[in-house]
Each structure stands twice: as C-alpha cells, then as structure tokens.
Amino acid sequence: MQSLFNSDTYFDTIHRLNKLTPESKPLWGKMNAAQMFAHCKEVFKIPLSDVQQPRVFIGVLLGWMVKSKLYNDSPWRKNLPTSPYFKIIDERDFYIEKLRLTELIAKFYSSGPGWIGKYPHPFFGKFTPEQWGKSMFKHLDHHLKQFGV
C-alpha cells in the first residue's frame, strides 16, 4: 500500500488532483469535484489537528473491526457510507477547495510521520504514523478514481 509520506506517491497524487476540472464528473456517487475536495479536506484535518476530538461511541464499539480496511491493499467499495459530518451537500468553489485541499496534503507530507496523528481518530482510534500515511493515501486514491483520475 502506498503512503502519502512517500515522495513519489505525494507528487503523483498532486498530479492526479490537478487533472480535475470544474466540469469533471464522478463515475459514482453524488458529490461534484468541489464537494469531493471539501470532503477530503475535512478528513485531512483529523491527523493534522492540534485539538483532540472526542471518540464517537459507535466507533469505540465497532471501529476496530473495519480499521484495517483503511490502510490495507484492497480497494474500497463504491458508495461507502460516511459520517454526516463529512458529507458536503452545499455548493463549493472548485478552485478554493482544490487549493485548500492541496495545502493540507502538502502540510501532511511535509510534517512527516513523526508529527502526524498526535490524537486518536474519533471513530477508528489510534493509528501509527505508517497507518495514517497509508489511510490518507487510500482515501484520496478512492476519490480520485471516483473522478476517473
């Protein structure tokens, strides 16, 4: 599994992201490209946060059962459910959301594994730096494939 801490993976991911345009259409799902950027941006805030978020009760009970699917080699299914917090339903500006996501990806990469993920994920719990790198890549990869890049 690739990791966003790997320079080749990082630069390839940015290159793929830059192939998207405001007219890019999803192969599945309801989000447009700007909404997808905003969704991914919110997810990146978790490992980059300086504030510990409370664990979600259902995550404490069940998160461990699916956690490894976030960073193993098997692809994610299409149309997976997501937390209402991460659902972006309002219209967003493509260029602003793309810039903000690109900045967060760069911050994640440049911060390196020693700084990332000081606190547990609110649903899935504690990740190692290696797991953060792989899971963040896998999430972006899933959504970039959603848009055919």
Image (cartoon, rainbow, N blue to C red):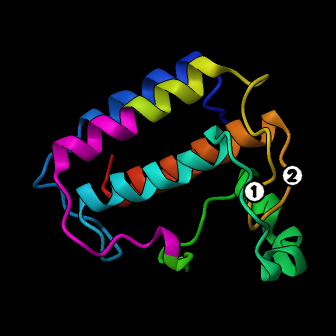
Q: Please, what is the dominant secondary structure of the magenta stretch?
A: helix
Residue on which the image places disc 2? 126
Q: Which residue of the protein is positioned furthest toward the front in this rendering?
A: 51
Residue at left 38%, top 40%?
101
| Above/below status of 76 relative to 111 | below
- Neighbour class for label 1 at 10 Å: few (<14), some, many (≥20)? many
Q: Say whether residue 104 is left or right of residue 3.
A: left
Residue on which the image places disc 1? 121
Q: Secondary structure at mark 1?
A: loop
Position in image of residue 28 (x %, y %): 34, 73
Q: Say whether residue 55 is left or right of residue 30.
A: right
Residue at left 27%, top 65%?
26
Position in image of residue 92 (x %, y %): 20, 59
Q: Mark 1–mark 2 contact, CB under 8 Å?
A: yes
What's the residue type where badge 1 is placed?
His
Identify the image quadrant of the N terminus.
top right
Mark 1 vs 2, N-terminal side:
1
Query: Is residue 87 a member of the stretch shown in magenta?
Result: yes
Position in image of residue 124 (x %, y %): 79, 63
Residue at left 16%, top 52%?
93
Q: Is residue 13 visible?
A: yes
Residue at left 49%, top 48%?
140
Tell me which segment is drawn in magenta: 85-102
What's the residue type where badge 2 is placed?
Lys
Pick the residue in front: 73 or 129.
Answer: 129
Query: Is residue 118 a member of the stretch shown in magenta?
Result: no
Q: Secondary structure at mark 2?
A: loop
